[in-house]
Amino acid sequence: MGSSFWKSATALLIGVGAVAVALWTSHTSATPGPVPVGARLVPADVAPGAQERHALDMIGEGRRTFRFDTFGDEAFWDDAPKLHRAIPGAKLGGVGPGLNPKAALEVGLKVDVLALTPDLVRQLQANQVNLDDPATTVALLKLDAVVCPRPRSTTWSST
C-alpha cells in the first residue's frame, strides 16, 4: 500500500480521536458535581410547598387522563361493537345477554372503588349486590366507576 493511503488513514484516525476527545471534554465539563448538603435546589422566590403541590396536581391530571380521556376512540367502540347496546343487554333495551360485573372483571375491566357511593360499598361488603346482573354493570357505568373504553352514547340503551 502506498504512503498516501497511510497518510490519509493517519489523518482520519487523528480526526476521529480529536472529535472523541472534544465530545468527552464537553460532556464532562457540563456534568454538575455533587449537590452540597443544605444547598437550595429551587430558586429562592418559589413559595414553600409549591413544587409538592404542582407534583400532586400533575399526578391528579395524569390519573384523570388515564381514567377519562378517550383519545378520540369513542366511534371505534360505538360503531363496530355497539357497546352502549351490548353491555345492558336485551332486558334493558340493548341487544344480547348483556355484560354482568363478574364477566366484565374476568375480561380485565376494573372498578374504581373511589367512584362508588358509601351505600354501594356497604352493600358489596355484605354480598347484597347481584354481580350476575347486567343492570349492576350499567349502574356502575353510570357512576363512572368502570375503567373501560368510553362510548359516545352513555344512555346505555337501544339508541
Image: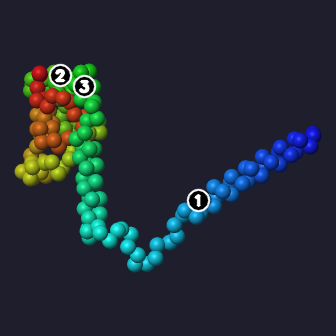
Amino acid beneath label 3: Ala
Residue 128 in the image: x percent, y percent? 9, 46
| Left or right placement of residue 39 versus residue 159 in this view | right
Distance CA(mark 1)–CA(mark 3): 49 Å
Residue 140 in the image: x percent, y percent? 14, 40
Sequence-earlier tag: 1 or 2:
1
Residue 132 visible in the shown view:
no
Amino acid beneath label 1: His
Task: Classify mark 2: residues with Cα within 10 Å, few (<14), some (14-19) or many (20+).
Answer: few
Disc 1 on helix, strand or loop?
helix
Residue 124 in the image: x percent, y percent? 13, 48
In the picture of the structure, the residue carrying the numbered disc 3 is: 75
Farthest-out residue, left: 119
Residues tagged 1 and 3 counted as in contact (Cβ below 8 A) = no
Q: Which mark is residue 96?
A: 2
In the picture of the structure, the residue carrying the numbered disc 1 is: 27
